[in-house]
Amino acid sequence: MACHGSKTAWVPRIAQGIDVLIEHALHGFKAMPAKGACGNCSDAEIKAAVDYMVTTDK
């Protein structure tokens, strides 16, 4: 939560579309490193994590 904030903070991010979120997660965006600095994570695992963060009610 420290890095990704509250569900409310995600509203404008989600509005960009899942493809943009996945692209940012896979390749990094601003201060966020590619794959969240998880060098051992597969693209499929990162995509699943993004989906989870978008669809899970926190």
Image: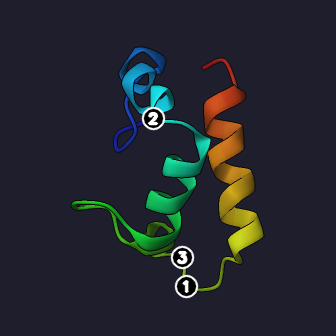
Q: Amino acid at mark 1?
A: Gly
Task: Tell me the CA gap for discs 2 and 3.
Answer: 23 Å
Q: Position of residue 50 (x, y in %)?
A: 62, 47
Q: What residue is shown with label 3?
A: 38
Instruction: Residue 39: give its label.
Output: 1
Q: Please, is residue 46 above or below residue 12 in the view?
A: below
Tags 2 and 1 touching, CB below 8 Å: no
**Are there few (<14), some (14-19), or many (20+) residues within 10 Å of tag 1?**
few
Tags 2 and 3 touching, CB below 8 Å: no
SS of the residue at dot 3?
loop
The residue positioned farthest toward the left in the image shown: 30
Select label 2 or label 1 by which is in front.
2
SS of the residue at dot 1?
loop
Q: What residue is shown with label 2?
A: 16
Tags 3 and 1 touching, CB below 8 Å: yes
Residue at left offset 75%, top offset 53%: 48
Identify the mark nearer the N-term, 2 or 3: 2
Task: Tell me the CA gap for discs 3 and 1.
Answer: 4 Å
**Are there few (<14), some (14-19), or many (20+) residues within 10 Å of tag 2?**
few
Q: Please, is residue 47 above or below residue 53 in the view?
A: below
Select label 2 or label 3 by which is in front.
2
> Which of the 4 image quadrants contains residue 43?
bottom right
Q: Amino acid at mark 3?
A: Cys
Q: Position of residue 36 (x, y in %)?
A: 46, 66
* Observer-nearest of 40 and 24: 24
Image quarter of the N terminus: top left
Residue at left offset 37%, top offset 30%: 5
